[in-house]
Image (cartoon, rainbow, N blue to C red):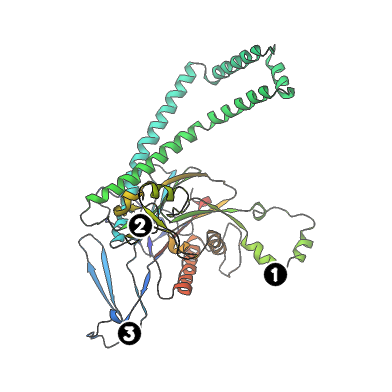
Amino acid sequence: TTTTTTTTPHPNKWRQRFSFCFTTPDHILPFPRHVVGTFSCHGMEPVYDSDYDDNSDDEDGDDALTNKNNNNGTTTTTTTTNKNNTSIAKINQDRGGIIYPYANSHNMALFAVYDGHGEGGELVSQYALGEVSRILGGRLVDGLKTMQSKKKKKKRVEEMMGGHDGEKGDEDRKKKRRRRRKGMMLDSVKEEEVDCANDDDDDDKHDTCNTDNKNYSNDNSDDDEEFNIIEQSFKETFIKVDRGLLDEEEIEPMYSGTTACVVLRRHQKLYVANCGDSRAVLARRRRDDCGGSGDDDDGDEQQQQGEEEQQKQKKQSFITIPLSIDQNPDSPGEKERILDSGGYVSPPPEPGLTARVWLDSNMTQIGLAMARSIGDHAVKSVGVIAEPVVSVHTVDEELDDFVIIATDGVWEFISSEDAVDIVGRYLYKNTNGEKEDSCGGGGASEACEALIKAATAKWHEFEGDYRDDITAMVIRLKDLW
């Protein structure tokens, strides 16, 4: 199924879901399917003999489906299985959402995935899906509007004071005063520049470097202010959503919760807020893969490469750049916070498994597999927090190609590098299965579905009849706007 959100939900409307089927026209979606692809697959769990109803009257051997409408606006599908089945579908507790335009701006878009866990975890992830976008949007509108007002006021003041020329004059005067103290007073700016280029005095070089750094800092002061506003907005929003769970009668946040991996695209920057073990990665094209004429000896090199080497080179068409870091209980900084708060962390019992957070030294209570989450209030007192880690990435318009956001149903058995390879192969594949250039290809939706299928196959290979919920998004950066 594909779940997207086109408008910000109103307060207390978090139960409402905006779901679109595959026949929905592209112009109704926030982005066309070849630009942004989404896919979500419910989990599975094994069926045991005790799960069968011995008094079942189902004679034809087919599964019976019963739909129950809940008071909270959701629908629960109950599957009655026959004895030929070895597994049954679980309730999908993952959620995903896309909003464009966002926060009253056509230069902003919001992408998010949430992985609910615990009994009723689907309600926590659904609540977070609606409330994070609603609250964050309001904070961004207010914060960025205030920033723009300050910039306009500063510009007016600079114009009144002579603008940047006045600032440059002040800096020149300060520099000359420093040189007077050293007995190195120069008669002109030209002489000063020559002296800076040839002077071996370490202090003078230090002065010049400091001046360059100050100018660089001034040029990026607006970026720093914007990041601070967006970072603070993300953190306040996640904490408010976490506390808001207590006011919802249908939700029990003590033993259920959700991860959150939210990516905000604003102009040419990606702001990523991550809470838990969902993940966002970026695929950057290698410069050698961007086209252009080759060297004269390219033919000789290609002749020397065997089929195996060519296949390896094809896999390395993209560089994988992490946009978020999994917040596991034994991660640096996370473990120390939990231990300082009185919690206990058990190491992974075997390779491939995760550490866990416990309330007691005997490690019998809770056992949460992440260090940050929305909900899970039973372990909030021992250092599990809802505050996200926020980072920013400036998009390289030439090289940065696509972003993958996914829950740990993908990352459990597929590395970030392998996920980028799978998506890259299907993103630029024509109808004959051959690789095309960046102008063609199967599109984001086909690539996203291929990633989900690969993850599903891995779960079956390693876990048999058990499978976690799997949700992913593929976003082609160049085609957003």
Rendered residue at 57%/66% (across/down): 430
Secondary structure category for the residue under label 1? helix
Left or right of 412 in this view: 145: left
The residue tagged 1 is 307
Query: In the image, is 252 to the left or to the right of 412?
Result: left
Disc 2 crowd, CA 10 A, few/some/many (<14, 14-19, 20+)? few
Whether label 1 touches label 3, CB < 8 Å = no
Whether residue 247 is visible to the viewer of this picture, yes or no, is yes
Residue extending farthest to the bottom is: 59
Name the residue: 73% across, 20% down: 194
Give amino acid for label 1: Glu
**Pointer 3 residue:** 83
Q: Report, in whole angstroms, how far the alpha carbon at label 3 lies from the one at label 2.
A: 42 Å
Q: Where is residue 286 in the image (x, y as percent from the top left)?
A: 63, 53
Q: Does residue 371 appear to the left or right of 436 in the view shown?
A: left
Up-down: is 120 above or below 387? below
Instruction: Give the amino acid at mark 2.
Output: Ser
Specify which label sits upstream in the sequence, 1 or 2: 1
Count of marks overlaid on the render: 3
Tell me which label, 3 or 2, sits earlier in the chain.
3
Name which of mark 1 and mark 3 comes first in the sequence. Answer: 3
SS under mark 2: loop
Which element carries disc 3, helix, strand or loop?
A: loop
Would you place residue 313 above or below residue 159 in this image?
A: below
Q: Using the image, determine if residue 435 lies above or below residue 129.
A: below
CA separation, marks 1 and 2?
Answer: 55 Å
Q: Which of marks 3 and 2 is in front?
A: 2
Q: Residue at 48% across / 35% down in the picture? A: 224
Name the residue carrying label 2.
361
Q: Where is residue 199 in the image (x, y as percent from the top left)?
A: 73, 22
* Residue at horizontal 77 percent and vertical 61 percent from the top: 301
